[in-house]
């Protein structure tokens, strides 16, 4: 394997026999090496071949920032999920799950806990994916000695559901149309043009996709309201709150859907984050 590009000491890009890019991982495989050098096969731990070029580029961007152990664990969880669920998962799972695992571990180290207000719905509608999410928590604990909260099993399940959508969501056109409509409201409200190739926009789009999926498939939102937290979020991100009200009005008028406070809260947080990182 000849190095075409170095992402970090543990990840490089090479070409396969068909001259197509592949992502190659191994501890220290790029240390003291340069483009054009040969990587011995016995130093390679994992090889990724992602069919979609855009997904591959985003994955490369992410891998340049994350520890090797997180990437390896993500791959192990994905392999387990494919076997347990017996479903095809979109390659985007490599981005979303790897990114989420790293973020969840960082939050735990900082003592930050994030409540998953969708947990009840996830257990009810996506029990198989939730089972995999719980198994993933066991794998995290085994590898890092960190027991993530049950909420994280739900978040992992959402990433799996999202990766299944291209196969199962039904009306992809309607889902995509709704996502575009909401994105346009955000663009016009803040008068911005998003960098749609960035990881941050990808995170925002992932949330929108699940939101639209649930809305279009009439999966009701059941939860216990946390009015105090909602008021804090509303005050802290007042401009994003105003934008979400526009989105809620649009959905009521065009889809006869009433956006709950918890759904608004999550939209506010995601919109505030993507706007902040877009500036």
Image (cartoon, helix red, strand yellow):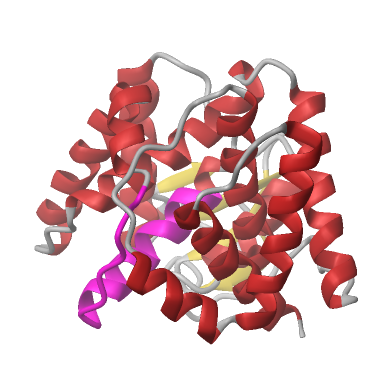
Which corner quadrant holds the C terminus?
bottom right
Q: Is residue 166 visible?
A: yes
Q: Nearer the viewer, residue 225 or 70?
A: 225
The answer to whether residue 67 is seen in the rendering is no
Identified at 42% across, 58% down, the residue is 100
Looking at the image, residue 67 lies above or below residue 169: below
Task: Answer whether residue 185 is magenta in the image.
Answer: no
Which residue is nearer to you in this view: 82 or 125?
125
Residue at 45% in and 67% down: 10
From which residue to which does the magenta span run?
A: 95-117
Q: Position of residue 3 (x, y in %)?
A: 65, 61
State whether residue 70 is above or below residue 273: above
Residue at (32, 44) in percent of width and height: 223
Q: Could you tell whether 98 is left or right of 49 in the image? A: left
In the figure, is residue 159 to the left or right of 211? left
How far from the left and from the top, in percent, is residue 91? 59, 37
**Residue nearest the observer in this picture, 111 or 52:** 111
């Amino acid at each position: 394997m000849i190095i075409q590009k170095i992402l970090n000491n543990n990840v490089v890009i090479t070409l396969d026999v068909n001259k197509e890019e592949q992502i190659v991982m191994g501890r220290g495989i790029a240390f003291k090496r340069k483009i054009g050098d040969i990587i011995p096969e016995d130093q390679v731990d994992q090889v990724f071949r992602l069919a979609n070029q855009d997904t591959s580029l985003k994955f490369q961007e992410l891998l340049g920032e994350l520890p090797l152990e997180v990437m390896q664990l993500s791959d192990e969880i994905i392999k387990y999920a494919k076997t347990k669920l017996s479903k095809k998962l979109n390659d985007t799972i490599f981005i979303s799950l790897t990114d989420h695992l790293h973020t969840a571990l960082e939050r735990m180290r900082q003592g930050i806990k994030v409540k998953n207000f969708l947990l009840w719905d996830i257990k009810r509608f996506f029990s198989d994916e939730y089972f995999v999410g719980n198994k993933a928590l066991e794998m995290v604990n085994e590898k890092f000695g960190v027991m993530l909260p049950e909420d994280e099993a739900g978040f992992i399940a959402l990433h799996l559901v999202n990766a299944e959508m291209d196969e199962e969501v039904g009306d992809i056109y309607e889902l995509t149309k709704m996502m575009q409509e909401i994105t346009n409201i955000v663009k016009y409200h803040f008068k911005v043009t998003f960098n749609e190739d960035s990881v941050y926009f990808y995170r925002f789009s992932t949330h929108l996709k699940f939101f639209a999926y649930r809305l279009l498939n009439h999966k009701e939102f059941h939860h216990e309201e946390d009015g105090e937290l909602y008021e804090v979020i509303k005050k802290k991100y007042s401009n994003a709150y105003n934008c979400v009200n526009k989105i809620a009005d649009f959905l009521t008028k065009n889809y006869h859907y009433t956006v709950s406070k918890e759904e608004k809260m999550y939209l506010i947080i995601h919109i505030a984050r993507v706007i902040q990182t877009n500036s």
